[in-house]
């Protein structure tokens, strides 16, 4: 069999496989969360969240609500160098994001069944 025929059969089978795979996975909520940032964000996002008094005061001061905070968590980046990832039990993460072109930091204590938002601070870039 010629090389061009082998390549043709390979590409034909590969394309059919992609179509079948797309058909089976199209209705499911599948995701590829393999990076440490994505796994941490997903782990925090699926848990029930509590807010400390300081975090609630900051949320109220800046006229935010819990849905916006959830969005900020889901779209944020974890700063692992400033986070306490070595703690046994509950780890504390620093999530950085921006809201209306203002940088902000969220400190979140991530335990087994609950995530507690410890603080929400807007950072002054001046």
Image (cartoon, rainbow, N blue to C red):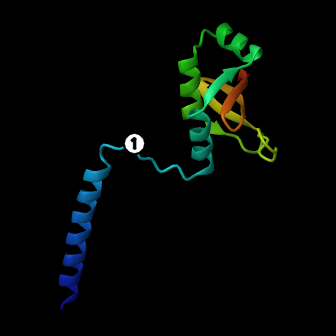
Looking at the rendering, in which quadrant would you find the C terminus? top right
SS class, disc 1: loop
Label 1 neighbourhood size at 10 Å, few (<14), some (14-19), many (20+)? Answer: few
Q: Position of residue 103 (x, y in %)?
A: 65, 26
Between 59 and 90, the residue placed more toward the observer is 90
Q: Position of residue 5 (x, y in %)?
A: 17, 83
- Res 9 quadrant in image: bottom left
Looking at the rendering, in which quadrant would you find the N terminus? bottom left
Q: Mark 1 highlights which residue?
A: 29
Can residue 100 be seen here?
Answer: no
Between 125 and 23, the residue placed more toward the observer is 23
Question: Viewed as shown, does residue 7 lie left or right of 123?
Answer: left
Taking the spot 57% from the left edge, 33% from the top edge, the residue there is: 45
- Res 113 quadrant in image: top right
Q: Is residue 32 above or below residue 7?
A: above
Q: Is residue 87 above or below residue 57?
A: below
Can residue 41 be seen here?
Answer: yes
Q: Position of residue 121 (x, y in %)?
A: 72, 21
Q: Position of residue 28 (x, y in %)?
A: 35, 44
- Res 54 quadrant in image: top right
Count of numbered marks: 1
Taking the spot 57% from the left edge, 14% from the top edge, the residue there is: 65
Taking the spot 30% from the left edge, 46% from the top edge, the residue there is: 26
Residue at the bottom extreme? 1
Question: Viewed as shown, does residue 86 lie left or right of 66?
Answer: right
Residue at the right extreme? 87
């Amino acid at each position: 069999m010629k090389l061009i025929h082998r390549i043709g059969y390979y590409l034909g089978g590969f394309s059919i496989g992609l179509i079948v795979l797309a058909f089976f996975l199209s209705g499911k909520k599948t995701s590829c969360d393999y990076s440490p940032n994505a796994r941490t964000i997903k782990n925090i996002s699926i848990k029930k969240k509590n807010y400390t008094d300081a975090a609630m005061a900051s949320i109220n001061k800046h006229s935010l609500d819990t849905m916006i905070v959830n969005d900020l968590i889901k779209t944020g980046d974890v700063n692992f160098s400033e986070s306490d990832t070595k703690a046994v039990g509950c780890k504390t993460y620093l999530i950085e994001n921006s809201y209306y072109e203002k940088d902000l930091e969220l400190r979140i204590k991530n335990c087994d069944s609950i995530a507690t938002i410890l603080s929400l601070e807007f950072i002054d870039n001046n």
